[in-house]
């Protein structure tokens, strides 16, 4: 099955980023395809390269970058939501790209299931 | 702007559950709805829980220094987004009726909305 994922909450503050990541990993491990992960609302903060979590904690941003590199998952950050929160190309982590909301609607059209993580 | 998917028309339902101010979900949710209109999809909106307050007439936000975006709901018709559903139980619980809302809507019970949700291809909740 072809999945797309929507992440609506920021890293560390909320479980959504972790659950979305675990879901994506599990789906891929089961042989499904995760074509795109779209980051919206505070979810755009998943894409900043500036986070430095404590050594003994998971590195949520690096985890996404690795997923993009190893599984060619398209990580898309909403431009309007990103600009509101000070996220721009210069502080974007590798593997992410900034684009428009149309990419979310397109993901809904092209995937078999769009799964939302957030409140 | 974004390239359109030729031919595919899916049923999209956007569910609005949160009050218009206090968090950014309602405002940013509405932005997705407007963009979806450009994709020629079968779009509907549902308002439930505190989300019904998004459609409340007479919003005045000057005191909290936040933009009053409620006029945008009246513009939805111009985007051919005309299927607006409001959950009856949510209105009742808040002492509101259809007359308190700033756009024409269809008031449905929770069960009726549940049945509609079942028919959708894509459900996005804000």
Image: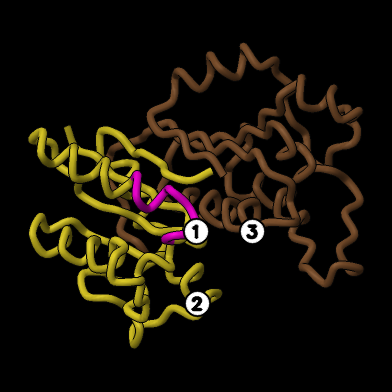
Q: Which residue is mark 1?
A: A13
Check the picture and name the quadrant holding the N terminus of chain B: bottom left
Q: In the displayed structure, would residue B104 be above or below residue B111?
A: below
* Disc 3: which residue: B24
Q: Is residue B90 magenta?
A: no
Horizontal and vertical percent for residue A110?
A: 25, 42
Helix, strand or loop at mark 1: loop
Which colour is chain A painted?
Answer: yellow
Nearer the observer, A68 or B121: A68
Residue where numbered disc 2 is placed:
A83
- Indicate the secondary structure of the residue bearing disc 3: loop
Residue at mark 1: chain: A
Magenta stretch in the rendered image: A11-19
Mark 1 or 2, which is nearer the eye? 1
Measure the C-alpha gap from mark 1 to mark 2: 20 Å
Q: Which chain is brown?
A: B
* Marked residue chain, label 3: B
> Is the residue under label 2 in contact with that under label 3 (CB below 8 Å)?
no
Give the crowd class for mark 1: few <14, some 14-19, many >=20 residues within 10 Å. few
* Residue at the spot 43% in from the left edge and 71% down from the top edge: A79
The front one of B10 and A83 is A83
Indicate left or right for A68 with A59 as reference: left
Q: Are marks 3 and 2 on the same chain?
A: no
Which dot, 3 or 1, sits closer to the camera?
A: 1
Which secondary structure lies at badge 2? helix
Above or below B88: residue A92: below
Q: Quadrant of residue A90?
A: bottom left
Nearer the observer, B4 or A31: A31
């Amino acid at each position: 099955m072809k999945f797309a994922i929507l992440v609506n909450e920021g890293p560390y503050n909320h479980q959504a980023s972790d659950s979305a990541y675990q879901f994506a990993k599990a789906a891929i491990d089961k042989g499904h395809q995760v074509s795109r992960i779209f980051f919206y609302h505070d979810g755009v903060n998943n894409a900043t390269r500036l986070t430095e979590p404590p050594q003994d904690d998971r590195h949520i941003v690096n985890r996404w970058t690795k997923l993009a590199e190893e599984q060619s998952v398209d990580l898309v950050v909403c431009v309007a939501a990103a600009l509101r929160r000070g996220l721009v190309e210069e502080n974007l982590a590798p593997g992410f790209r900034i684009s428009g909301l149309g990419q979310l609607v397109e993901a809904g059209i092209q995937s078999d299931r769009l799964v939302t993580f957030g409140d | 702007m974004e390239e359109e998917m030729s031919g595919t028309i899916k049923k999209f339902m956007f569910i609005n559950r949160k009050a218009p101010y206090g968090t950014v979900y309602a405002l940013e949710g509405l932005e997705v709805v407007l963009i979806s209109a450009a994709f020629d999809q079968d779009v509907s909106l549902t308002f439930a829980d505190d989300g019904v307050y998004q459609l409340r007439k007479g919003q005045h936000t000057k005191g909290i220094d936040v933009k009053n975006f409620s006029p945008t709901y009246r513009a939805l018709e111009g985007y051919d987004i005309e299927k607006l559903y409001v959950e009856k139980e949510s209105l009742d619980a808040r002492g509101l009726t259809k007359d308190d809302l700033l756009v024409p809507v269809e008031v449905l019970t929770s069960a009726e909305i549940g049945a509609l949700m079942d028919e959708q291809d894509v459900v996005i909740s804000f």
